[in-house]
Amino acid sequence: MKYFDFHTHAFTDSLAERALSALSDTSGKVPATDGTVKGLHEIMKKNGIDEFLILPVATKPSQQISINNWAVEIMGNGIYSFGTIHPDSDDALNEIERIKSLGLYGVKFHSEYQNFCPDEERMFPIYEKIADEGLIALFHGGWDPFGNENIKCTPERMAKAIEKFPQLTFVVAHLGGIFVWDDVEKYLAGRFENLYLDVSVIASFNISDSQLMRIIEKHGIDKILFGSDCPWDNPANEIEMINRLPISDTDKEKIFYKNAHRLLNII
């Protein structure tokens, strides 16, 4: 089987140790890599994964330019990357243009790290610009250990944003939202032609196979993407999770790599 991991993370060599230590302390999770691109490559190779997508996040407006420059530098040899903007940046719209010109594939958002909710009106010009540039918008969905009890990116709020921008392709990570899968079934699954869901890290949060199958069937095989959230999970866990589901090998191929290739226009 061929695989494309649609949801991974890495950091510059100089930052990796510090970033992983801080995030590990917050999450209580033991990372599966050392946080470097080299370390990510090694675990992907071990799991038979030849292609993967790195999703950087700017936690401050001042970071977006340097992070996007780094994202371009690491692409190639099976590595693809999104860019990042911070919603509070005065230059967010221009940076989206630059993300497109750099050859990056989309924009990654994390509501808990960037302090916004997806249906806030201040986000609308950003979404419009991403759509105009033909890029993809990908969101962390649901609970995150960095946040608090009030989840910022809920399925209901995500649905309100998606409804307003049918011309924009959205991806919501973690099958629409960690620990809020009942609301994913209610507000997201099967409702939007322009919405994809990735399955990253959910094997570590004990979603039942029955609920996973309900969401996949309701939303449609063609809009489900394999991902791991590595280094916050070993991709072997999500591979095993998909493989044990009662779906055909043809549909597993779609989830494991064909849907990603189509979405990113990889030939």
Image (cartoon, rainbow, N blue to C red):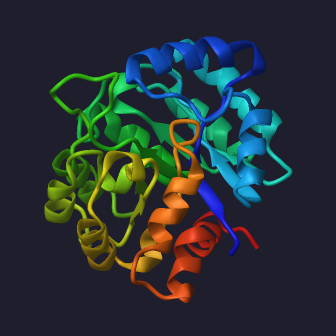
- Residue 15 picture quarter: top right
Q: Position of residue 42 (x, y in %)?
A: 78, 43
Left or right: residue 100 versus residue 60 is: right
- The residue positioned 21% from the left and 33% from the top of the image is 151
- Residue 8 picture quarter: top right
Left or right: residue 20 versus residue 173 is: right
**The N terminus is located in which quarter?**
bottom right
> 225 or 42, which lies in front?
42
- The residue positioned 73% from the left and 22% from the top of the image is 12
- The residue positioned 30% from the left and 68% from the top of the image is 209
Left or right: residue 252 versus residue 180 is: right
Q: Position of residue 176 (x, y in %)?
A: 31, 54
- Residue 181 picture quarter: bottom left
246, above or below 172, in the image = below
- The residue positioned 59% from the left and 66% from the top of the image is 260
> 240 or 250, which lies in front?
240
